[in-house]
């Protein structure tokens, strides 16, 4: 197992977008992409937090237009591949995927909620027909059993996906969950399996290593964990741990550490922290990217953001459903209002 | 002497005693049973009647069947209950299910071996087309909590003689290209359709694989070994065994069959299959003796009645999974099952 | 004694779940009479149900319509975009009104709460999409109250189980159809549509949010316009409910509705499918009312429309 090289994908400039409300600048992209290329990660993922076409009022408007973000990164990368996250239902083939291809994206990671893999069929096929690489991605994987994840992964594999990623988008998993799910996929799928961690319960690195233990060949990590909610598995820690455990990868540890130092400077205002919001979010099993929108809405409506997370979790809200934050916050606010006689409802 | 009805009621009380908590999810819900007037269906209705009468379950049932008027006539104590509704129709032509259905037991199938011989095509069609129709209708329901597909222990193929019991992962190949294969194949196909539906629609679905049973309400006209033996004994005729009597089966009593079925419905894990049957093996010769023991004078047992070379076969389920995951046990051992069944058949039917 | 209004004779093409639900609505309508339920599979559940209810059926699809062309005035097409492109030509030749529930986009975009009157002039109307029917009235209301819309967006969440294989494989087309139709009513603002599928059980009801970027939004006027149009929609979609009235949060105008289906044939959680059917019925009934003799006034009361 350990003689196989582990592929390292770095979505600092995509997942990190959530952490700064999608206000990543051209300068930040240029400087970090240069460092990522030097560090030797296999792929650098760039774009809005929810992927191609997601710059929207629903999830948040990007500071920089998508094409420009991708072109900026493209210019800095030679050995490192340029990757994008694609969600059918948000991104379309004709507009977003075609544009991204023109700019020179190498890898399209086509994602769906963990039970809806059939939404990715056409998009994966389109990418493959154009001669680019396509992986299938299942999000919010804490919401499905390993059997369901296997079944959905097999669908993506049958569409031609060349790799399958399980994303713990809510940061809700513990190492044993990861071993069960990644383990089953690694055993039964033909294509390499990967894991993308979030740190809401402080387990991102442990979960990532657990994934490697049971046969994952791809890991996501972001510089200083710069990403949604409590952030992702910090790339520097993942690469360091891999070295300690004897896993090979193309990335150079010192250069990865340098990229981490750079990220600390570049993204100083939005480096991930673990706090009551992110912890409750992880326990409630809510998409990590909701952290900032929940805080904003809760503040405006005068309700406790933790209560909003708990309710969103109870309703089993999936990624992309940020509008429900408004509904829940409004509802909670209405419940708090005292009635005419001064007594609370 | 207890009447037939009293015997059945006593059986249902016995199997439910101390075990109603497990079935609590059924309380206040609407259950649909297709094929609800067959052997299993009748016992399910008896159990639900007891749960409603004695334990305030308030479970409503809609039964689909092709022999409703006959059923209502023969079992007025079930046919006229106000919380049971009986609909007449062929499962192949089902258009929709009651919108308020919460649970479904799909037991509609052609299971008579004599039909397999004369009209195998109809058997295949009802078992497979009927299942597709049912699954499509089920995927339109508002609040479906679980669907139990009643499959068959025959889907595994022939059991190897050296295996004591077969569990849910067992599989042995068998040729599909002759008419004899139609029952097992159509049941396997219905399981494959179920898996496909689940993959597309994620409806909650559990599979039950029943083996062999005995008990009141089972027609003695059916061509199973146990029914043949009992029928011949009651008629004072000798029991005829085709082979040397070494073929091994197992038999579960009807009340356990019905209880385990309900348990699978409310506690079965989605996408899982459960063997339902007795794990106690019995060879046909011993079974024959257990039956004749109840008659005075005991009828003769003739073996090797068939042509020479009649094969010994074995079909005994391992039910550890059901016991472990559903929390069920066998409550009526074989000897008692035989005795109760014979007593019931000896009790005259009240007109 | 008042003359009873003569019912408009209609046919339904397409006997799947949507066509069957439409049939139930036609049967309940005091203005419409279903003279034919046509599809390709006589043994489908919808066909059998129609037959059980005494509605004439045909397994010959569009041919069934052609053969009996004199028997009806209006045809609902609930087949597929591919098929409707063919059917539209035939129906036009036959001089029959067409109400298209597919994404074929052949005819005039029709959202009853917004442009019903104009649509009565058209021979072929297109019902856009489920998200379109839910959001376009809101887009229209927002545009009517705010002249300066830079950008307007709609996000719909539907139960996974209400999204069949056709919806899933045509997701991109659904988004494009919805965006283009929104643009017609958004007064120049850029448009975007997003669709989310949620597998939670019990199944979630359809929910639609419209978000707008407006220079100087007039919240009061918007609230009034939205409330008015919601009332209008509720006339033909009783389960359409405003759950978050217009508000401004994080520099955007937001409004949210939930659509509970009637549960005629499709389950109530499939409000997305129900709303498009209700809209189609509304158009047909409007045609029927237009062509029926006027009702006499009774006891000084207002004549029924």
Image (cartoon, rainbow, N blue to C red):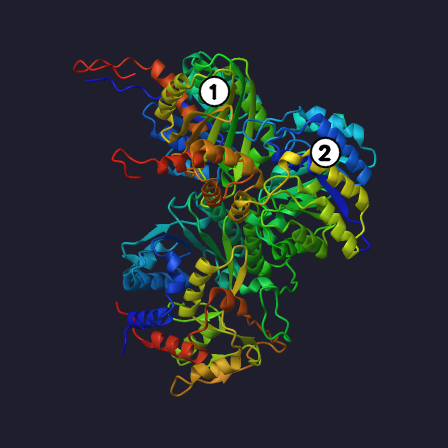
Q: Is residue C104 visible?
A: no
Quadrant placement of the C terminus of chain B: bottom left
Please tell me whether residue B27 is drawn above or below residue B309 in the rendered image: above
Tell me where residue C288 appears, x and y as whole percent. 36, 18
Q: Residue furthest bottom?
A: B297
User: Would you identify the image quadrant in which residue A260 lies?
Assistant: top right
Q: Residue at x 40, y 60 (%)?
A: B41
1 and 2 marks in contact (CB < 8 Å): no
Tell me where residue B51 appears, x and y as whole percent. 33, 62
Q: Residue at x 38, y 34 (%)?
A: C262
Of the two numbered discs 1 and 2 in the rendering, the one whose residue sits closer to the viewer: 1
Q: Label 1 lies in what chain?
A: C
Please tell me whether residue C262 is drawn above or below residue C301 in the rendered image: below
Quadrant placement of the N terminus of chain B: bottom left
Q: Residue at x 44, y 62 (%)?
A: B263
Q: Tell me the residue that label 1 is attached to.
A: C139
> Distance from label 1 to label 2 (Cα)?
34 Å
Tell me if A158 is positioned left or right of B335 in this view. right
Q: Residues within 10 Å of mark 1 (few under 14, many from 20)?
A: many
Q: Label 2 lies in what chain?
A: A
Please tell me whether residue C266 is drawn above or below residue B176 in the rendered image: above
Q: Nearer the viewer, residue A25 or A3?
A: A25
| Label 2 element class | helix
Q: Nearer the viewer, residue A172 or B45?
A: A172
Tell me where residue C170 appears, x and y as whole percent. 59, 31
Same chain for the residues at labels 1 and 2, yes or no? no
Q: Tell me the residue that label 2 is attached to.
A: A127
User: Would you identify the image quadrant in which residue C166 lies?
Assistant: top right
Please tell me whether residue B17 is drawn above or below residue C203 in the rendered image: below
User: Would you identify the image quadrant in which residue B235 lies?
Assistant: bottom left
| Label 1 element class | helix
Q: Is residue C2 visible?
A: yes
């Amino acid at each position: 197992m350990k003689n196989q090289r582990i592929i390292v994908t770095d979505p600092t400039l995509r997942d990190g977008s959530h952490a700064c409300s999608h206000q990543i600048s051209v300068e930040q992209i240029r400087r970090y992409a240069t460092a990522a290329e030097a560090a030797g990660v296999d792929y650098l993922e760039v774009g809005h937090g929810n992927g191609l076409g997601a710059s929207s009022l629903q999830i948040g408007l990007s500071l920089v237009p998508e094409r420009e973000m991708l072109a900026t990164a493209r210019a800095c990368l030679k050995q490192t591949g340029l990757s994008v996250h694609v969600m059918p239902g948000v991104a379309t083939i004709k507009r977003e995927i075609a544009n991204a291809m023109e700019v020179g994206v190498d890898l399209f990671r086509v994602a769906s909620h963990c039970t809806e893999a059939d939404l990715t069929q056409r998009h994966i096929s389109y990418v493959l027909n154009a001669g680019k690489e396509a992986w299938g991605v299942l999000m919010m994987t804490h919401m499905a059993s390993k059997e369901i994840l296997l079944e959905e992964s097999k669908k993506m594999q049958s569409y031609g996906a060349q790799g399958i990623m399980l994303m713990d988008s809510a940061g809700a998993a513990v190492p044993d969950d990861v071993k069960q799910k990644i383990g089953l996929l690694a055993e039964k799928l033909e294509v390499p399996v990967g894991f993308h961690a979030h740190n809401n319960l402080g387990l991102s690195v442990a979960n990532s290593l657990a994934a490697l233990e049971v046969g994952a060949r791809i890991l996501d990590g972001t510089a200083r964990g710069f990403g949604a909610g409590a952030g992702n598995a910090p790339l520097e820690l993942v690469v360091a741990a891999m070295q300690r455990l004897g896993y090979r990868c193309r990335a150079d540890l010192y250069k990865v550490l340098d990229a981490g130092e750079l990220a600390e400077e570049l993204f100083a205002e939005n480096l991930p922290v673990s706090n009551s919001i992110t912890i409750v979010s992880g326990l409630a099993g809510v998409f990590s990217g909701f952290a900032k929108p929940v805080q904003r809405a809760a503040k405006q409506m005068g309700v406790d953001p933790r209560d909003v997370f708990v309710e969103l979790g109870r309703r089993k809200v999936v990624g992309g459903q940020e509008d429900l934050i408004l509904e829940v916050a409004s509802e909670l606010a209405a419940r708090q209002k005292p009635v005419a006689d001064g007594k609370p409802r | 002497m207890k009447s037939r009805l009293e015997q059945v009621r006593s059986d249902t009380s016995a199997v439910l005693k101390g075990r109603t908590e497990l079935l609590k999810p059924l309380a206040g819900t609407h259950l649909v049973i297709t094929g609800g007037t067959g052997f299993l269906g009748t016992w399910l209705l008896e159990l639900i009647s007891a749960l409603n009468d004695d334990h305030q379950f308030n479970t409503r049932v809609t039964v689909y069947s092709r022999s409703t008027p006959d059923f209502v006539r023969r079992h007025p104590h079930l046919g006229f209950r106000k919380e049971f509704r009986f609909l007449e129709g062929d499962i192949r032509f089902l258009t929709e299910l009651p919108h308020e259905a919460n649970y479904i037991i799909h037991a509609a199938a052609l299971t008579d071996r004599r039909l397999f011989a004369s009209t195998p095509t109809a058997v295949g069609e009802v078992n497979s087309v009927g299942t597709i129709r049912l699954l499509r209708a089920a995927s339109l329901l508002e609040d479906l909590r679980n669907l139990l597909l009643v499959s068959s222990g025959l889907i595994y193929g022939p059991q190897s003689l050296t295996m004591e019991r077969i569990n849910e992962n067992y599989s042995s190949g068998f040729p599909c290209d002759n008419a004899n294969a139609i029952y097992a194949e159509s049941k396997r196909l219905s399981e494959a359709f179920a898996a496909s539906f689940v993959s597309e629609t994620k409806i909650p679905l559990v599979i039950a694989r029943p083996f062999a049973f005995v008990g009141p309400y089972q027609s003695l006209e059916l061509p199973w070994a146990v029914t043949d033996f009992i029928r011949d004994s009651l008629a004072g005729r000798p029991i005829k065994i085709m082979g040397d009597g070494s073929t091994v089966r197992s038999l579960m009593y009807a009340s356990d069959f019905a209880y385990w079925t309900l348990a699978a419905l409310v506690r079965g894990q989605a996408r899982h299959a459960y063997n339902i049957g007795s794990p106690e093996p019995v060879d046909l010769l011993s079974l024959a003796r257990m039956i004749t023991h109840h008659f005075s004078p005991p009828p003769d047992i003739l073996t090797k009645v068939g042509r020479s070379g009649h094969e010994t076969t074995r079909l005994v389920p391992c039910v550890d999974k059901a016991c472990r995951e559903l929390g069920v046990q066998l409550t009526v051992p074989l000897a008692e099952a035989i005795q109760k069944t014979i007593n019931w058949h000896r009790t005259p039917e009240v007109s | 004694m008042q003359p009873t209004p003569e019912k408009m004779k209609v046919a339904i093409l397409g006997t799947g779940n949507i066509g069957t639900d439409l049939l139930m609505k036609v049967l309940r309508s005091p203005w419409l009479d279903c003279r034919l339920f046509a599809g390709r599979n006589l043994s489908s559940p919808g066909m059998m149900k129609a037959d059980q209810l005494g509605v004439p059926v045909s397994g010959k699809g569009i041919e069934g319509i052609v053969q009996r062309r004199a028997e009806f005035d209006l045809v609902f097409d609930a087949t597929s975009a591919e098929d409707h492109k063919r059917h539209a030509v035939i129906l036009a030749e036959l001089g029959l009104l067409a109400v298209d529930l597919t994404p074929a986009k052949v005819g005039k975009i029709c959202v009853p709460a917004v442009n019903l009157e104009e649509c009565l002039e058209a021979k072929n109307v297109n019902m856009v999409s489920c998200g379109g029917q839910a959001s376009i009235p809101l887009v229209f209301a927002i545009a009517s109250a705010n002249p300066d819309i830079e950008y307007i967006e709609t996000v719909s969440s539907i139960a996974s189980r209400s999204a069949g294989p056709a919806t899933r494989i045509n997701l991109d087309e659904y988004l494009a159809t919805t965006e283009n139709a929104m643009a017609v009513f958004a007064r120049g603002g850029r448009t975007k549509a997003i669709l989310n599928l949620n597998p939670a059980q019990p199944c979630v009801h359809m929910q639609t949010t419209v978000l707008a970027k407006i220079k100087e939004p007039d919240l009061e006027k918007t609230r009034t316009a939205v409330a008015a149009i919601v009332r209008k929609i509720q006339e033909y979609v009783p389960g359409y409910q405003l759950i978050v009235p217009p508000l401004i949060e994080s520099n955007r105008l937001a409004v949210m509705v939930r659509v509970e289906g009637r549960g005629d044939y499709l389950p109530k959680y499939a409000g997305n499918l129900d709303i498009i059917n209700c809209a189609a019925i509304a158009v047909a009934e409007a045609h029927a009312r237009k062509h029926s003799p006027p009702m006499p006034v009774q006891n000084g009361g207002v004549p029924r429309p």
